[in-house]
Amino acid sequence: MNAEIVAIGTELLLGQNVDTNSSWIARQLALLGVDVYAFQQVGDNEKRMEEALKLACGRSQVVITTGGLGPTVDDLTRKVAAKVGQKTLVYYEHIVKEMEARFFRSGRPFPKSNLNQAFIPQTATIVSNPVGTAPGFILKVGKSHLICLPGVPREMKAMFEATVKPFLKGLEPATGIIKSRVYRTTGISESRLNEVIADIFESSTNPTIGVLAHPEGVDVRLTAKTATEEEADKLIDELGKILITRLPNTIYGLNEEELESIVGQMLTTRHMTLATAESCTGGLISSRITKVPGSSNYFLRGYVVYSNEGKSDMLKVDPKLIEKKGAVSAEVCKALAENARTQSGASVALSTTGVAGPSGGSAEKPVGLVYIGLSDESSTQTFKFLFTGEREVVQMKASQAALELLRRHCLGLPLGD
């Protein structure tokens, strides 16, 4: 069985919203053994929506749309789906009653515009919305099953789990599942990683191997297609062991695990505490650390010392040192890390200072130059990096490198390799 996903909404085409719905649905379909053949994005335009749905229903057995089911005039999915399926829209009183009850429970008045959501294409199966007002529906269009869901991720996911997944399972006997596992690496370039795994990349057909680079590192995705989840896990485990031996010390997590969460777990189990002193990263490291629930157990203090005065006033860095060596220097980076640790009483401290750009660079200290320091009770070390990319990319790469130094410190791995 093959499928196509159509994300609806002009805001997607304008770049105002990121389409995370399609990727989530694709992962769920893979676990059901459904091959996704295509993605489409289309704005809130009746003619173009009709063209997109006709194309999708003409070539795919299952078409899942998200968006365009709200109460406003630009929510056109119901109307267009009915037109593509050559059906009329039918008004369902019980949908109105359910919406009225939801608004009553919340203490809000019921807007008349929500009545638009009670119109569903004739013969369609209604998909109830347990967490919102917009119902979805499943409509047979030729040989295709057109499944229309809201664009709000929380509502879409609840409706998919409760209704769409059982519906898809009942369409035809399962022929297998597609399962992926992502091995997350950092501190190794995409080109170097490709060199290391080139032979297994070329020879492995099940699981297949995919590589995706981003500012935080390089992800290696193993995807197996088998009859059962157990068989898929076995194939992925076998190739994963080879991958781990090829990439020693660079794999920090799996799937959607973030480095800040991994580091947080390590600090917790080791009863360690952390402080940060950030200049060029402007608090990004502490923001990532505190994004993790429970981080108050190990994160003591974060200093954002962007100006030279801040470095001296808050962390007692000698102004003469800054004047002599420059704010972007190994010496100032070392002082920041040491003083942040001693002032906060933390077990370990991280510091950053650098030139994030786009201006401020020189021949001696170009844009992308970042020093990162790590201080513990026994010593303080600094490391020099030269990152590429726009300002935000340099900052993200620097924060990732700092957290990776901390991970290696916790594991007792060499920090400089």
Image (cartoon, rainbow, N blue to C red):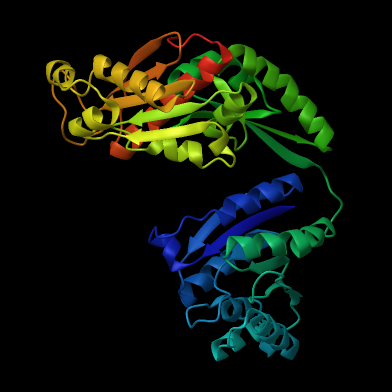
Tell me if I can see residue 212 in this picture.
no
The picture places residue 331, in percent across and down from the top left corner, at 25, 14
Tell me if I can see residue 171 in this picture.
yes
In-image side of 243 versus 286 (left or right): right
209 vs 21, nearest the viewer: 21
In-image side of 329 versus 259 (left or right): left
Identify the residue shown where x is 51% and y is 71%.
49
- Number of marks in the rendered image: 0
Identify the residue shown where x is 73% and y is 91%.
93
Q: Is residue 195 above or below residue 215?
A: above
242 vs 315, nearest the viewer: 315
From the image, which quarter does the C terminus lie in?
Answer: top left
Identify the residue shown where x is 25% and y is 19%.
332
The picture places residue 247, in percent across and down from the top left corner, at 57, 15
Residue 183: quadrant of the picture: top right
379 vs 10, nearest the viewer: 379
Q: Is residue 286 above or below residue 341?
A: below
The picture places residue 41, in percent across and down from the top left corner, at 49, 60
In-image side of 211 versus 35 (left or right): left
In-image side of 213 versus 222 (left or right): left
Residue 106: quadrant of the picture: bottom right
Residue 263: quadrant of the picture: top right
